[in-house]
């Protein structure tokens, strides 16, 4: 799966270059927890590199990731939380996270 491929740094760059981030973000809207888990897991892996973080934010990844903080699956919540932690490493992404109302769902996980 893409989640497994996204562990390798060379593959991460290839996924980004081929426009895979948009497709993976779209998986978060699928009403199947297994698909959401693999999508969030892939984004988590990709978010470990800075190139992917900017693309994820640009491709509209914040709102669906924030929505996944309220998932019924603890694994999805964990993947989304770690991904958001990586994405909010930059000041501009932190501001967008706050603007997208991400703080309350995050606090609700405590």
Image (cartoon, grey):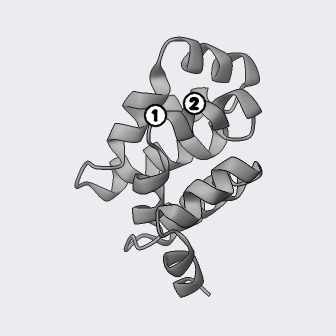
Image point (59%, 83%), residue name: 107
The image shows residue 13 at horizontal and vertical percentages of 67, 18
Position of residue 57 in the picture relative to residue 8 (left or right) = left
Residue 90: tell me if it is visible.
yes
Answer few, some or many: residues within 10 Å of disc 1's Cα (few below 14, many 20 plus, some between 14 and 19): some
Rendered location of residue 98, percent (x, y): 57, 66
- Say which residue appears at 70% left-offset and 58% top-offset: 85
Residue 59's disc is 1
In which quadrant is the C terminus drawn? bottom right
In what element is the residue under mark 1?
loop
- In the rendered image, residue 50, in percent from the top left (x then y), is placed at 75, 33
| Front residue of 92 and 46 | 92
**Residue hosting label 2:** 55
Residue 106, horizontal then vertical, whole percent: 57, 76
Say which element carries label 2: helix
As displayed, is residue 67 above or below residue 57?
below
Per the model, the C-alpha gap separating discs 1 and 2 is 6 Å
Q: 90 or 5: which is nearer to us?
A: 90
Q: Which residue sits at x=40%, y=54%? A: 64
Left or right: residue 106 compared with residue 48: left
Depicted 74 relative to depicted 41: above or below: below
The residue that appears at 38% across and 29% down in the rendered structure is 23
Dots 1, 2 in contact, CB < 8 A: yes
Local packing at callout 2 (Cα closer than 10 Å; few below 14, some 14-19, many 20+) is: some
């Amino acid at each position: 799966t893409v989640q497994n491929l996204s562990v390798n740094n060379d593959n991460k760059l290839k996924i980004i270059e081929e426009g895979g981030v948009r497709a993976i973000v779209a998986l978060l809207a699928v009403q199947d927890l297994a698909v959401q888990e693999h999508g969030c897991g892939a984004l988590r892996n990709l978010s470990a590199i800075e190139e992917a973080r900017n693309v994820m934010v640009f491709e509209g990844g914040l709102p669906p990731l924030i929505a996944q903080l309220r998932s019924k699956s603890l694994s999805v919540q964990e993947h989304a939380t770690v991904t958001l932690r990586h994405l909010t490493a930059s000041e501009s992404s932190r501001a967008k996270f706050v603007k997208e109302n991400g703080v309350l769902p995050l606090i609700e996980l405590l």
